[in-house]
Image (cartoon, grey):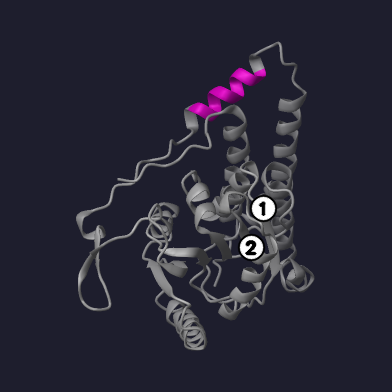
Amino acid sequence: MELPLPPSLPAAAAVLALALPGLAALLLVLVRAAPRSPRSWAGAICMIAHVTARKMPTFHRHEKEKFFVNAEGRKESVPSIHDPPTRELSVVVPSYNEEDRLPLMMDEALGYLEKRQKRDPSFTYEVIVVDDGSKDETTKGVFSSRGKKILMVDADGATKFADIEKVEEGLKNLQPWPNEMAISCGSRAHLEKDSVAKRSYFRTILMYGFHFLVWFLCVKKIRDTQCGFKLLTREAALRTFSTLHIERWAFDVELLYIAQRLRIPIAEVAVNWTEIEGSKLVPFWSWLQMGRDLLFIRLRYMTGAWQLETRKCN
């Protein structure tokens, strides 16, 4: 359940929600229109981007994170995405205070995976539940994957797990994959009219404002960047997650922005989706944070504060 806005904020929130896309668009237009010879605009933007930018941290695993106990009860070293794959599919589930929603999602996912393995014994899989919803911990989960393909799926179970076959088909249709890289995104864009009818006017404004910012600043051809149901080839996961900077809600957008910069083919596939109570997203404040992050994604890559470099993992 989403938290209500404090009574004193709705008017200011509506104004900011309307103004934020316009301000971002104006800033980008001014930056593009500024003459190249005077360095005032470029210098100011570059300085702000570099001063406020966070560099990618090097991942360090604690001692207890370097090993796991396998199904036979033996202790093994945690695998690395740099190793050759030993499973057909890795399912990575970011989880943060999901004790109510995660069990139902896991029952559905494991039920599907076990039935599929019975039909096809060559199909092997693993499920990695990340016990912290942050981007860094989720990336650690991806980096520990053993699958040829890696599915990122939200813990709320809003998307029917059987729809993995739809995103698999989307991935297949992108072949041949350049450098073995491709991404297939589950999408709720086909449900937009119904969702608008159920949302308040204020939330509808926020939604359209966010969609405009995503389109204008970062990702042009994907209508729904936020659906938590994305299938990546192993190489695509390595290249994109190795470059991520943004934490929290907008990291999906940066993931797809990086993929576009690297010319990784992306498919968008309609999936079944049901809104599940218990969302951690707080209206207005989360959207405002996402709007800020979208602007930072564009400016920092544009000014060179962030590079398409590879994260180190020790």
- From the viewer's side, name the closer residue of 76 and 214: 76
Disc with the residue nearer the chain's start (1 vs 2) = 2
Question: Which x, y percent locates residue 90?
Answer: 45, 68
Question: What residue do we see at 53% from left, 76% from top?
Answer: 157
What residue would you read off at disc 2? Answer: 185
Q: Main secondary structure of the magenta part?
A: helix
Mark 2: amino acid: Cys
Element assignment for label 1: loop
Question: Which x, y percent locates residue 238?
Answer: 48, 51
- From the viewer's side, name the closer residue of 243 and 120: 120
What residue would you read off at disc 1? Answer: 265
Report the disc number at residue 276.
none
Q: Is residue 68 left or right of residue 228?
A: left
Q: Is residue 172 left or right of residue 88?
A: right
Question: Which x, y percent locates residue 297?
Answer: 59, 40
Question: What residue do we see at 34% from left, 46% from top?
Answer: 313
Q: Is residue 133 left or right of residue 283?
A: left
Q: Which residues are magenta?
A: 41-50
From what the image shows, is residue 112 above or below residue 260?
below
From what the image shows, is residue 3 above or below residue 41?
below
Q: Is residue 49 visible?
A: yes
- Toward the top, the furthest residue is 37
Q: Is residue 158 left or right of residue 18?
A: left
Question: Which x, y percent locates residue 138?
Answer: 43, 58
Mark 1: amino acid: Pro
